[in-house]
């Protein structure tokens, strides 16, 4: 992340030196994509330097809304039919991009399992957990003759769950989708607020100088930036990355005087809630 941040900072300084107008949203998207890909796959996408074009092209497809997509149209107009349409093979996500990322993740996992390579990323955490479970299985078999209680065995059976290859791919996609668009949009609106509120910008700048100085940036030090945290939270309130989201009731539920039947689609209007003085 430090290396990606250095390149990002260099790009910003280049625009500042040239006094050139640029699209901060595009730059933030490149920065976020490089970080997410690094933390997830330990892959250098280098989108800030316009490298690794094929991977970047497929990753960006996950965040491009195609209004000609039947699944998207049904989701927006008739949410209850979403499940039916999905079973017919339609998908919210582009099929070619899914196939590309699936093959990529499978290749990475297949190299990690036999210890051909080891990295410090999200995929490695899941592979390591899988190895821990296999080791525990061997220990449990060795304890079968020691008179271990049935309840202890049942507890271990519950905790030994590992992810299938499909689940690993699914987790990787969720990690990427959840981290990319939300972060880049937040950063863009944060910079917008800083540009339109120079007084607040100066306070943020002074706090960073006071707390971080010239030391290395760490999670613990960033956590001390209270004023910056408040500004980011206010930015999220004013400009939420998602203005609404839907959830499906898995069971019948009583919410006060309201009865919510199982299968009901609940739409949460995030933007109106954030801008309602009552809340």
Image: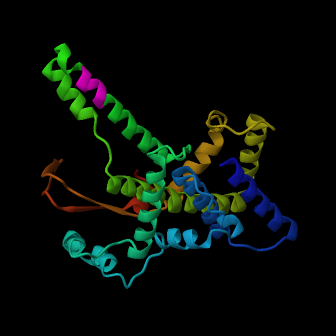
- State left or right for residue 65 relative to residue 258: right
Q: Nearer the viewer, residue 146 or 216?
A: 146
Image height of 274 relative to 138, above or below: below
Q: Quadrant of residue 74?
A: bottom left
Image height of 214 relative to 154, above or below: below
Q: How is the image coloured?
A: rainbow
Please say whether residue 223 is visible from this viewpoint.
yes
Q: Quadrant of residue 244?
A: bottom left
Q: Residue at x 38, y 52 (%)?
A: 168
Q: Residue 45: x and y, percent?
A: 62, 62
Q: Residue 180: x and y, percent?
A: 52, 60
Please say whether residue 239 is visible from this viewpoint.
no
Is 139 within the magenta? yes
Q: Residue at x 56, y 62 (%)?
A: 185
Residue furthest bottom as drawn: 68
Bounds of the magenta span? 137-142
Q: Residue 237: x and y, percent?
A: 50, 55
């Amino acid at each position: 992340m430090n290396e990606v941040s250095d390149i990002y900072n260099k790009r910003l300084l280049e625009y500042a030196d040239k006094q050139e107008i640029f699209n901060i949203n595009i730059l933030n998207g490149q920065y976020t994509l490089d970080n997410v890909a690094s933390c997830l796959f330990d892959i250098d996408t280098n989108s800030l330097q316009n490298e690794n074009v094929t991977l970047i092209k497929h990753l960006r497809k996950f965040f491009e809304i195609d209004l000609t997509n039947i699944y998207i149209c049904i989701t927006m107009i008739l949410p209850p039919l979403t499940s039916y349409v999905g079973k017919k093979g339609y998908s919210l996500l582009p099929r070619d991009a899914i196939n590309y990322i699936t093959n990529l993740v499978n290749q990475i996992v297949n190299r990690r399992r036999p210890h051909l390579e080891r990295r410090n990323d999200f995929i490695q955490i899941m592979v390591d957990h899988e190895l821990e479970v296999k080791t525990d299985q061997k220990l449990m078999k060795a304890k079968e003759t020691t008179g271990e209680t049935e309840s202890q065995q049942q507890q271990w059976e519950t905790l030994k769950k590992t992810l299938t290859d499909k689940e690993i791919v699914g987790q990787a996609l969720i990690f990427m989708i959840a981290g990319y668009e939300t972060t880049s949009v937040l950063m863009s609106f944060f910079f917008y607020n800083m540009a339109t509120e120079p007084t607040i910008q100066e306070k943020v700048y002074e706090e960073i100088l006071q707390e971080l100085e010239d030391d290395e940036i760490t999670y613990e030090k960033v956590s001390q930036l209270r004023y910056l945290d408040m500004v980011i939270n206010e930015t999220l309130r004013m400009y939420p990355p998602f203005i609404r989201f839907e959830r499906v009731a898995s069971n019948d539920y009583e919410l006060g005087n309201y009865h919510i039947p199982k299968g009901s689609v609940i739409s949460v209007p995030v933007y109106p809630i954030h801008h309602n003085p009552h809340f």
